[in-house]
Amino acid sequence: MTIRSASALLLALTGCAEPKRDPVPDSRPYAAEVRQAEQDWATWIVGTRWSLARIEGAPLIEGTSAELSFKPEETWMSGSAGCNSFTGSYIRRGAAGIEIGPLAVTRKFCQSPQGIMQQESRILYLLDTADSYAATRDTFTLFIDAEPVLIYTAKP
């Protein structure tokens, strides 16, 4: 094959390539919300320590505290339920869905204040059962069947 015929063949083959096209925007329902949730999760939800403010609409027992934090670039979380610490995995689904657990929990017993172990048990149950979340820069709320069950506030 001569150089001239090889050049002609190469030119003919490159003419068959499909022209470049602009990317098509994702028009699926909630695509923009999912993208925003991904950005929010990566930029500020993960980087915040959350302190539990309300459990099923009620404040925590006086003298107790609980917190939650999500690990960056992982699907791992940790926190305290009042007396015991926990770690566990989570999976985010769509723009606001979440599945938490299983949780590994330390096994200390705290005697006071009265009711702390019952409160802790309820917190762990609600974490494990939560199915969605909503977040602002100041609050992180977990829901079960669209009912807010755990409301956390950003810890300074």
Image (spheres, grey):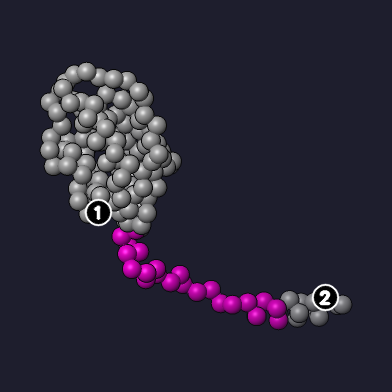
Q: Mark 2 and 1 residues: CB-CB less than 8 Å, in contact?
A: no
Name which residue type carries label 2. Answer: Ile
Q: Is residue 73 above or below residue 92?
A: above
Write the start and end of the magenta stretch as one range.
12-34
Name which residue type carries label 1. Answer: Asp
Q: Position of residue 82 (x, y in %)?
A: 24, 27
Which quadrant of the figure has residue 57?
Answer: top left
Q: Is residue 38 above or below residue 119?
A: below
Which quadrant of the figure has residue 94?
Answer: bottom left
Q: Is residue 68 above or below residue 140?
A: above
> In the visual, does 31 lie left or right of 151?
right
Residue 77 makes an appearance in the image: yes
For the residue pair 90 and 13, the one nearer the viewer reads as: 90
SS class, disc 1: loop
For the residue pair 124 and 132, the one nearer the viewer reads as: 124
**Which mark identifies residue 145?**
1
For the residue pair 75 and 121, the one nearer the viewer reads as: 121
Q: Quadrant of the C terminus?
A: top left
Eye-nearest disc, 2 or 1: 1
Q: Position of residue 101 (x, y in %)?
A: 38, 41
Near mark 1 (Cα within 10 A), the count class, few <14, some 14-19 or many ≥20, is few
Residue at x 87%, y 77% (from the top left corner): 1
For the residue pair 28 and 133, the one nearer the viewer reads as: 133
